[in-house]
Image (cartoon, helix red, strand yellow):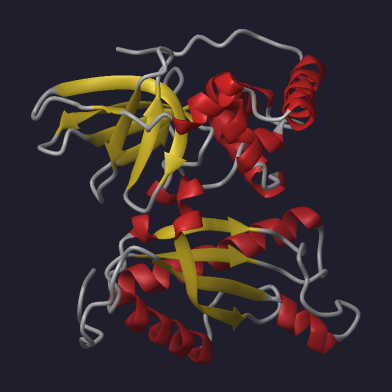
Amino acid sequence: MSIIKIKKRQPFMVVCGLAFLLMTVSVFGQTPGIQAARNQPKITQSVPNGAKMKFTGVVIERDADTFTLRDRNRTDYRILLTDQTSIKTHGGFFRFGKKYAVTDILRGLIVEVDGRGDAQGQLVADKVRFNEADMRAAITTDTRVNPVEENQQRLAGQMDELYTIAAEAKKDVAAANERISALDEYDVQESVKVNFRLNSAALSVEAKQQLDGLAEKALNAKWYMIEVGGYADSTGSDAKNFQLSRQRAEAVIQYLAVNHQIPLRRFVSPMGYGETAAIADNKTAAGRAQNRRVELKLLLNRGGSQRPSVTSSARP
């Protein structure tokens, strides 16, 4: 069993250290050692077929059905998620852990995985466990992240520790993390906005028709993901708006999963963003109506191909 040991650091020292590393790269450019590290191919440790294994590490990459876990020895393992994978927080004394969806596994999250190897050398996850505080840190990081992938690549081997620090510090090091790097390989095929009534997360008839159309196109695709984000207008408190926007995103996902059997692992970024990112003026009734929405993006992998047209009863 691989276990990551995290040394406690003060947040201020963590931020200063990260800033110094990024500044060093920008000033001195790519040294031969760093450039060589970037050119090294990614190597994933194979898991013996049928072997029951348990790993602890940091999520460093995430795709639709899989994620890459890196342990304290800097060994990478490919983890396969299925509809049967149990994803929960660690339970305390006389307390059961909180359940999470497969879509909530974020890059930078420290996890413990139990499962068995398959014929492809992946670990098919039976259980994924993590701490509630680490999940809150990963979500906070997700909402504040900046595009720093290029700087992360230049830092090469030093990034292992930075990912761990980002999960531990919970804030102020958001630039050390990025949500699901695999999305860089996906293109937006179609965008849909569905609107909601005031203080409601119930789908209207029109909203369901819009979702039906998006689902039909998704089911005709071979490699796809659906990005989901919920929003609210400025009515009510910040806490209420964040909760309501999350409920709206969940209502959309539930409708697509139940009525069109789209697997939950196909959804990414199922978050509520409150009244942030308003697309219209909240001072008018018409503007607030536009801001009460869920935005969906159908993402197709550039390396994938479209299957022949089929009826909406097809399954992914």
Q: What residue is drawn where x is 28% and y is 79%?
A: 220
Question: Which residue is depicted at the point 24% across and 35% down?
Answer: 126
User: Please, is residue 110 above or below residue 98 in the view?
Assistant: above
Q: Nearer the viewer, residue 123 or 17?
A: 17
x then y, percent, for residue 192: 54, 80
Position of 298 compared to 279: left or right? left
Would you say residue 90 is visible in this rendering?
no
Q: Which residue reaches farthest right? A: 283
Q: Which quadrant of the figure contains the C terminus?
A: bottom left
Res 193 → quadrant? bottom right
Residue 113 position within the rendered picture, expressed as x and y whole percent measured from the top left: 32, 27
Q: Who's the residue at 65% across and 29% down the image?
A: 30
Q: Is residue 183 something that shows in the picture?
A: yes
Horizontal side of residue 177 vs 20, given as left or right: left
Q: Position of residue 221 (x, y in %)?
A: 30, 74
Quadrant including the N terminus: top left
| Foreground residue among 130 and 191 | 191
- 193 is higher (above) or lower (below) than 73: below
Residue 53 vs 123, above or below: the answer is above
Horizontal arrangement in the rendering, residue 8 relative to residue 234 (left or right):
left
Outermost residue on the front side: it is 32
